Amino acid sequence: MIDFELDEEQQLIKDTVVSFARDEIRPHAREADEKGLVPAALVQKGWELGLVQGTIPEEYGGFGNPHSAITGAIVAEELAYGDLSIALHLLAPRLITVPVLELGSPELRKEVLPGFCGDAFRAGAAAVMEPRMDFDPSAPATTLTRQGDDWVLAGQKCYVPLGAEAEHFLVVAGTANGGGPAHAQAVVVGRDTPGLAVGERERNMGLKALATTGLALDACKVPAAHVLGGGAAGTARLANLSRVALAAMAVGVARAAYDYARDYAKDRRAFGQAIAQKQAIAFMLAEMAMEVDAMRLLTWEAAWKLDRGEDATREAYLAKRYAADLALKITDNALQVLGGHGYIRDHLVELFLRNARGFATFEGLAIA
Amino acid sequence: MIDFELSPALSEMRDRMRMMAEYMMRPIAREYDEREHEKPWEFINTTWQLSKGASVGPNAEAAEVTADAAEKAAAKQAERAAGQGSANAERNLRTVVAVEELSWGDAGLYLAIPGPGLGGAAVLAVGTPEQKKRFLGRFKGDKPVWSAMAITEPGCGSDSAQIQTTAVRDGDHWVLNGTKIFCTSGLMAGDPKNSNGFIVVWATLDRSAGRAGIKSFIVDAGTPGMTVAKCEDKLGIRASDTATLIFEDCRIPLDNILGSPEVPTTSEGFKGVMVTFDATRPIVAASALGVGRAALDYVREELGKQGIPIRYGIAPGKLTAIERDFMDMEAQLQAARLLTWRAAWMMDHGQRNNLEASMAKAKAGQVVTWVTQKAVEMLGPLGYSRELLLEKWMRDAKINDIFEGTQQINMMIIARRILGYSSKELS
């Protein structure tokens, strides 16, 4: 039965994250971007919200809350509203915990999950994207080849969040000689695996506070227990959970820019009135408000389908595509509302625009 | 808890509406587009017989008002006992779901379906019990009945506060004078040859009072002094008449006014009248969705026949232009649908939805205009041909970007709401 209301639990989580984003994240957004660093104290405070440990079962030391993509989308939007880089940093451990929880073998769960239930933040990372123009998440160029009882990874990855500190990497590669048809497959690789080399810190247009690196995989041996289950459908599910998280974050960034521009337009005066009283400006703001809601509803619908355990490739793909387009348009229009001031780094709008530009490209940077 | 699945009752109703759209509307869609001003009487009579007194469909409102109170109470109790929400709890949602299906069949024919329509909605919203009985009771009869809403005038459209039609009290009567245009179903509701219907007319009691002076009056079909002067020739929705009504010393009983006859010193009363739009805008949005989905379904089918796949999940850079267009159409339409459902759902839950109703209407009008234009383009020479319905859908679609508040009026409402501005501060 159609319902647009969060349940009590979700509302509670949302309220917590809303104030954290407002009081803790946003005040650090500019400095983190300029310095290329998320302050350790903030990371620790974020960890204490329990966003990672929350959905890990009690037997591994977590809180044992059920995993929900809708709840994940709500959290992702609110954190990204504060700041995208900081949000991605705080949620990076989920890139390991959620896939292992959903598709990991019992051994892998036992090996990996307890490490993410401690008192201190523990980094996790996913290596999905590849440094090539024709990168296709459904057919990665990185290969996963069977060799006896083990598998072997080879390839080059990029945009690996927290690559420098993560102990585990979720790597998505194309299967070869695997018996079945070739498909994208996710595996968990330990940092000390021979042949794995973490690259230099990357320098990107946005996400400047998020420490991303490259990752070289040269004949890395992966035990069979580290290959996630579910086959092609399992990997597709992870890709869709990722699309939902990124779409939700695009909503957060777009909403941040919209709020900023709306407040500015009500304050800024020209020709004897607030510029928000001019139709040219007011209509831009109205469209932003309408599209932010539209983006969110499409994202929630995809998340809802994933929570029902159904294939949501179409919904998640379309929601992310829509959100990426609109986040760019909205942040660009927000900058336009501020005029020359929008171009100055005293205001956050140029940061929102740089971050929003990435969504069309991003894959696998977060998971709902 | 967030849920995007229709309740079993709604999805069963949707299936019935879909059948009606496919088997009763599609086959005659082209015919009544070409034969503008001729009425699809067979279709009208059949829909009347099907929906009269039903709890679903164009006659739902009337059925609710006239249903035996005891029977209704018993039904409600049974529903509660069964642990299910009252069917009534989803009334607005049910309407938008039904309207999307019917408009998928044909938007013009949907508008021509007899029933209480916008006039009836106004009576239902603000009428006294006596008025509801007197005017809505007639929707239970053997012969089809329409009602209509007359707001627009030759000199004012969106700025309805500028209405020039006057209502003057003369003893036991109101006397109306003025001209109304663009009255949907005005011919069917206002001409006694067609039905025992009525028109809800906006007129001013005091022009100097501005919006505060505007009231709604109910004029029965055949009242002396009211004439249906002409029906417009239109771009689309040709199965539905769009009438000009002239009022010359048209006398109606005193108790045919909706709401209080007092002219307040504030414009609160006018705001009350405007609340009707919060219910009707999502309905127009739903009609837009139906037309848009018709076009999208057709394009999908044709692409399938040509062996052109839509590959969800591949790298964006590998998508073909056709795939990009199709995906954009699909996502845009779904975005509009979710905004529409939300606006209706809010009303069902007693939440104020003025902002969300305008979002739904603005978005759906915009989207359906673009989607149908794109569909004509994608089908190439076939799309432009009158052999197919695509070009008709494009013509039908455009009205949704205009009536019940143009896209721009709705954007203005959204802007005022998000900025906290009055109509004086942002105009």
Image (tube, coloured by chain):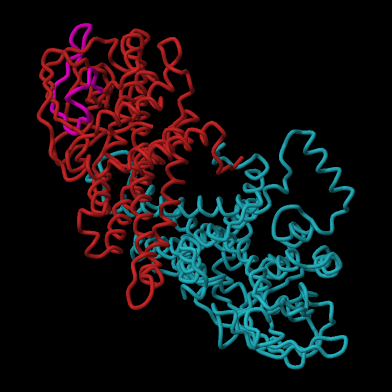
- Whether residue A121 is situated above or below residue A202 in the rendered picture: above
Give the quadrant of the N terminus of chain B: top right
Q: In this view, does A47 lie to the left or right of B204?
A: left
Residue B427 visible in the shown view: yes
Q: Which chain is rendered red in the image?
A: A
Residue sitting at x 83%, y 69%: B131
Point out residue A122 in the picture as x, y percentages from the top left corner: 28, 20
Measuring from the top left, give residue B73's x and y in whole percent. 85, 46
Instruction: Tell me which chain appears cyan.
Output: B
Locate residue B120, reporting x and y percent: 73, 67
Q: Is the magenta stretch mostly helix, strand or loop?
A: strand
Image check: A135 left or right of A70?
A: left
Q: Is residue B237 left or right of residue B202?
A: left
The residues colored magenta run A146-170
Examine the structure image and report whether residue A259 is included in the region drawn in magenta.
no
Q: Which residue is drawn at 27% across and 10% down?
A: A224
Residue A195 position by quadrant: top left
